[in-house]
Amino acid sequence: MKFNQSLTQDVTTEQIEDWSAQDLLPVAPAHGGAFETMTNALGAADPAPDVVIFGDSMTQQGLDPAELGQLLSEATGDEVSVFNGASSRARWGINRLLARYIVSLDELPSVALMGISTRAAERDDFYTSEGAKSPFSSMVEGCDRPASDTWSDADAARCERDVADPLFRFRTGGGQVARAEEGQPAQTSLRIREGSRLRSDGFMIHPGVSAAEAEEISDTRMERGFPGFPTVHDEAVAEFGEAADLLRSHGVTVLAFEIPYTPVHQANLEEAGRDYDARRQESAQALTDPHDVRLFPVDEFGSWWGDDHSRDAIHLAPEGATEFARQLTEIPDFLDEVQAGLAD
């Protein structure tokens, strides 16, 4: 299905409302097709997942929810379902949007796992420029937001029209409406290209490369210049806390874990910048410590990392995401903390 298509079908408000009630339409068009598909799948999950993962593309591609669910099931003796709600380019504005969507659903997860990558503590410019101004955000977050450089009177007026007028809300949802008109439910998985797809449990799949290729990709990135040290912005710390507090106020246990770059890229960064990895972990603590969220540090991927485990120098491939799920469960206290959250 193509996203961001103009609504050209001759449909009525009543039809839009009826298709929405039948779950043939998403909540509203979102800031990206993959994010919208993922939230469709999360809303359609029955029963609701026990664990939901938050984060950016590194977590979206780096932690296999099916494997983690199997490992948690073995540890607890009960079936545990896991959903990967991380998404590309997401910082904590986008993840806060996801948290707000989750609390609007009938059932909530017992545990939220916040994946923290190298750049996770940066401000969420993608949210302010696109995510916050999508019809999906209008429906989930409402329109009563403080005026700022990124939220004007025009933004508020557009948001209010999104909420009030279904035809305006789906003005860029022509593909979704055409699908609903054919009686098909809202899409919950997505083919990206040959060999790449978004699974219906939120996991993004891309083909892997050899360790040598990953190192070559890293070397090429480094030739462009040192990318700078991990950065902590106050907005990110606040938005992380807002997402965590919202979930905890609804009884969800919130835990955090680090997800590093590939060993070859981390080695390049460490060589180029003094104490780069220590600064990465300090930035993770800067997010979690003020909000009393338990953080599980990950210095590097285990000895399992090698050929076909990564998509590039930064993201894991499915084989690596399976191994990383196992590595997480082997961190001291991780299983105990997740089990305690599941039991609450």
Image (spheres, rainbow, N blue to C red):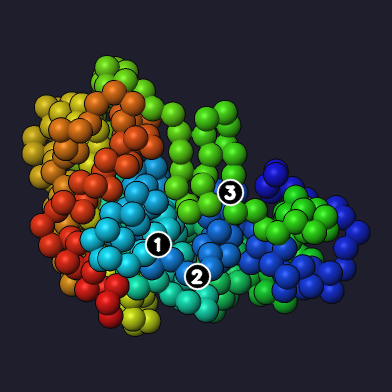
Quarter residue 292 falls in: bottom left
Image x and y of residue 230, in percent: 22, 45
Quarter residue 285 falls in: bottom left
Image x and y of residue 106, in percent: 52, 79
Quarter holding the C terminus? bottom left
Indicate which disc residue 47 carries.
2
Tag 1: amino acid: Ser
Give the labeled residue for mark 3.
Answer: 189
Tag 3: amino acid: Ser
**Which one is closest to the eye, mark 3 or mark 1?**
1
Mark 2: which secondary structure?
loop
Tag 2: amino acid: Pro
Q: Is residue 281 above or below residue 51?
A: above
Q: Horizontally, is 3 left or right of 43 in the view? A: right
Q: Residues within 10 Å of mark 1 (few under 14, many from 20)?
A: many
Give the labeled residue for mark 1.
Answer: 81
Q: CA distance from mark 3 to mark 1?
A: 17 Å
* Marks 2 and 1 close (CB-CB < 8 Å): yes
Q: Earlier in the sequence, mark 3 or mark 2?
A: 2
Image x and y of residue 209, in percent: 36, 23
